[in-house]
Amino acid sequence: MNKSTPMCSECSTKMQRGTTVFEYRDNGIQISIPYVPAWVCPTCGEVSFTPKTTDQLIETLRELVATAKKARQRQPLLREYLVKVA
């Protein structure tokens, strides 16, 4: 077995590389980030991120939450936004 392949902390199955949707919800703000690279358990679906991916998620969430809070303070008529970065 490849030593760099993690085992699932929930069911002890060997995890596989894949992608997942990372979702964040707090105080009326909902953020969904699709296609996040992750280790995914084929048995129970548990996901695990590398430290690099985790750092990028944290940085991205901080920016998006700050932007969402500013938009909410303006009390706009438009209450839902979809932003894609390619």
Image (cartoon, rainbow, N blue to C red):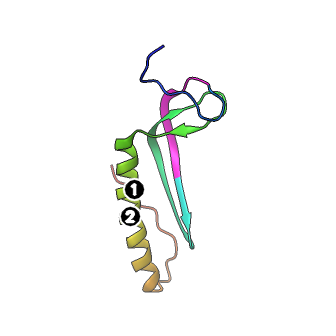
Magenta portion: prevailing SS class: strand
Q: Is residue 53 above or below residue 31?
A: above
* Label annotation for residue 58: 1
| Magenta extent | 13-22
Q: Nearer the viewer, residue 71 or 37?
A: 37
The vertical placement of 8 against 57, above or below, is above
Q: Which residue is mark 2?
A: 62
Q: Which SS class for mark 2?
A: helix
Q: Measured from the top left, where is residue 85 in percent x and y?
A: 34, 53
Q: Residues within 10 Å of mark 1 (few under 14, many from 20)?
A: few
Cβ atoms at labels 2 and 1 below 8 Å apart: yes
- In three-dimensional space, the C-alpha distance between marks 2 and 1, rounded to whole angstroms, equals 6 Å
Q: Nearer the viewer, residue 14 or 45?
A: 14
> Residue 28: where, in percent of width, then height?
57, 73
Q: Is residue 15 magenta?
A: yes
Three-letter amino acid code of the residue under disc 2: Arg
Amino acid type, callout 1:
Ile
Judge whether 73 appears above or below 10 on screen: below
